[in-house]
Image (tube, helix red, strand yellow):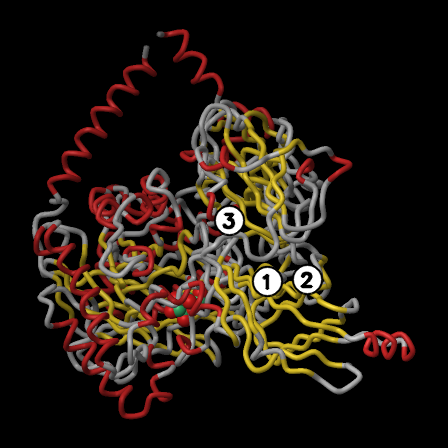
Amino acid sequence: MIELRIALSCLALSLILNLVVTAGEFFKPFNVTYDHRALIIDGKRRILISAGIHYPRATPQMWPDIISKSKEGGANAVQTYVFWSAHEPVRGQYNFEGRNDIVKFVKLVGSSGLYLHLRIGPYVCAEWNFGGFPVWLRDIPGIEFRTDNKPFKDEMQRFVKKIVDLMREEMLFSWQGGPVIMLQIENEYGNIEGSFGQKGKNYVKWAANMALGLGASVPWVMCRQVDAPENIIDACNGYYCDSFWPNSHNKPKLWTENWDGWYTKWGGRLPHRPAEDIAFAVARFYQREGSFQNYYMYFGGTNFGRTSGGPNYITSYDYDAPLDEYGILRQPKWGHLKDLHAAIMLCEPALVAVDSPKYIKLGPKQEAHVYSENAHIRAESTNESSNIGSCAAFLANIDEHKAASVSLFGRTYTLPPWSVSILPDCRNTAFNTAKVGAQISVKSTEYSVSSPDISPLQKTMIQDKVFPIPETWMIYQEQLGAWNNDSFTVSGLLEHLNVTKDKSDYLWYITRISVSKEDISFWEKNSVKPMLTIDSMRDLVYVFVNGKLAGSTFGHWVKVEQPLLLVEGHNDIILLSETTGLQNYGAFYEKDGAGFKGQIKLTGLLNGDIDISASLWTYQVGLKGESLQIYTTEGNEKANWTNLTPEAIPSTFSWYKAYFGPPVGNDPVALNLRSMGKGQVWVNGHHLGRYWTLVAPKTGCQEVCDYRGAYDSEKCTTNCGKPTQIWYHIPRSWLKPSNNLLVIFEETGGNPFEISILSYSTKTICAKVSESHYPPLHMWSHPDIVEGRVSITGIAPEMQLQCDKGHIISSIEFASYGTPKGNCQKLVKGNCHAPDTLSVVSQACNGKNSCSIKIANSIFGVDPCHGVLKTLAVEAKCSPNTITLESSVSDL
Ligand code: GAL
């Protein structure tokens, strides 16, 4: 009954939320301005921590959970780009539905009490197809992207205005009671401005004035734009931004993109950025007067369909973000940053109270910044209550190798290498960026990163429960070459995008060549083969001769040299040109095009080479299966499917389909395509994306990832020698209780009978917290501490354990309070161990979604080794909470 009541009250709550969402008033209307220190929101300087989330990279059903996990993780703002190509796929025809329902997304952010930074661009880069520009833009006569070019500026202005007007109509600006506090025009234009000379400079001024003229009445940002005009804030993007300063003393120090991970390509390694290093970068930023920082990405998500940019960016946009591709917490990253955010926000009153901090050099590579109107007096005061909120200090040790002992206001602090300690009262450390107290989680993906002892082992494994796709597979063989009468023949080579308009990855080029008897005998006599050469090609070409695949080449503007087996007389040559995500970065990228450049020749002939570029070529856009939409429930009936047996799997260019029931429960679902080659995949007509089992280089991964020292995307990589991506996200909301249609287009050959799905969740959690760890951050705002009745130093640290939503701690696999050793899934007791640890932890945690345990002798009933620093280490299993489900059913 209780469950039912909860369910009903949740329903009521969501109805109320919906009403609020429709009304569009989330806050009392407020103005946003800024000074050199911070954004000023409703008259107050604010410290802002923003979560980068791109709405089309998740489903609307996932948004509320992602936003609430961002808030729980300590974000008070969300940032997103606006994806023009998604909103205006055809010029003048807009799409604001489903994953493109930006208004709904912004309203959800507002109803969660978070602010929003909307980066309209409309150039966004973002590893998004064509950098976010619709591909039709390149067809506008006389257009040149991102420069002082009228056709481009007209289109850009029209779209930016459309979005600003939409936000205004929906009452989403702060002064209307909405969450939008800041906008962005362009994106990192400074990186390429030089390529455009004076026209580039003019364009910057034009873009700024155009944006300001739209009447949005909130601040506008340009990132990486040192020459941003006076009334636009120039912001920093990068792995570290503490040494960045805006181009005017009237502007605050903002960090629009803190790269907390990185993207990857097909055949690439997987990059990981250690939690300790991101925390260090963030703490350094706020230490050195930063006031807004956005995680790029907080949730990366998925490049569904053909949205991934490139060339060759993978379908997953996981980004090693604090929330993983499926929206599940990535631990210890999420938890460690949550602690960091809590510590920073404790400092907020002090941080914004002064115009600039007091700088104190503590050592050759150590420094403090103290935020207080009168740092000395406050820090030395004996009144415990006076400093919280009025004096905050950040102590940094930027030495990559050695810990340092430093003193500030008569107290001594030990700082691990490459770390920052945060002192919200200028006396006691609340947090150190190199000391991770957060739990680790082990989930259903496939990489493993181990760190030196100072950092916990982070390891993941394949989840035990895998569901094979049970049903029979059917096959439909794609037709090679022209399959429809909309194919056409012209003499000469046409540029790929000019023909496909990017409606499909695929373009067939078909021609016929004639070979003489003399040529054949010449080849036979000399044991040589003729060659088809293409001067330059991107991204992928398959070459067929007389209906048989001769070979393929993959690369970015690479030369193709394909040996051919030709017969006397006519030979039909088919080239399948493919794109795998359009360019999204660089000056003049709209001119890059795709497909072939230069000449296509037949070489090694008796009478010399023949240039076949000017021959008659027949063109066919896309696949027959695509045009029939055989991946949809209706469309798949139109194809001639036949049963497939494991013995008769063809090697290339086949469509496969099967029906499957999803794994039980509500957890996200992942599809394992390890047994396949390259292609695209759909579930119930939803395009999951491209897949490819291209393998990462065998070398270049690090056994141990040391968080110390400057990070770059090559520093902590995993997955060497393995396919870059084998798991593909099927959002739960795309699934039905049974009979889900899975359709795959496979180009190179693979075994569909080995495809499986699994429900994805955190299976194992581990944590290690010692007696010397910091008191729980929430205790700092306890009235007894705030009012000085109790000193924060007297409060014991705590271990927090948490399973995913809908899951409970089902068993404690290991627990030892004493001197346990080892890392997650390899924990062992040390010489010192409190015998009751397992029962104490089991009692506190079993059957619960989350629990916390104080790290103190009294909790474990004994001091197992007096005078020795003790640690609690726990490993627990998480399982779906079936009890709630069952009891609520029996209650009914
Ligand atoms: C930035 C760009 C982002 C994204 C990022 C790399 O330079 O502004 O949109 O592409 O790089 O993930």
Q: Which residue lies under the disc numbered 1?
A: 576
Q: Which residue lies under the disc numbered 3?
A: 332
Horizontal and vertical percent position of residue 222: 26, 74
Q: Secondary structure at mark 1?
A: strand
Q: Nearer the viewer, residue 569 or 215?
A: 569
Quarter of the rendered structure image containing ligand 1: bottom left
Q: On residue 703, which mark appears?
A: none
Badge 1 local density, few (<14 within 10 Å), some, or many (20+)? many
Q: Amino acid at mark 2?
A: Phe
Q: Amino acid at mark 1?
A: Leu
| Mark positioned earlier in the residue sequence (2 or 1) | 2
At x 56%, y 68%, the residue is 539
State yes or no: Cβ of the residue under disc 2 lies below 8 Å from any atom of ligand 1: no
Q: Residue 377 falls in which quadrant of the image?
A: bottom left
Q: Residue 817 falls in which quadrant of the image?
A: top right
Horizontal and vertical percent position of residue 879: 54, 27
Q: Nearer the viewer, residue 83 or 578?
A: 578
| Mark positioned earlier in the residue sequence (3 or 1) | 3
Q: Which residue lies under the disc numbered 2?
A: 544
Q: Nearer the viewer, residue 31 or 514?
A: 514
Q: CA distance from mark 3 to mark 1?
A: 45 Å
Q: CA distance from mark 2 to mark 3?
A: 50 Å
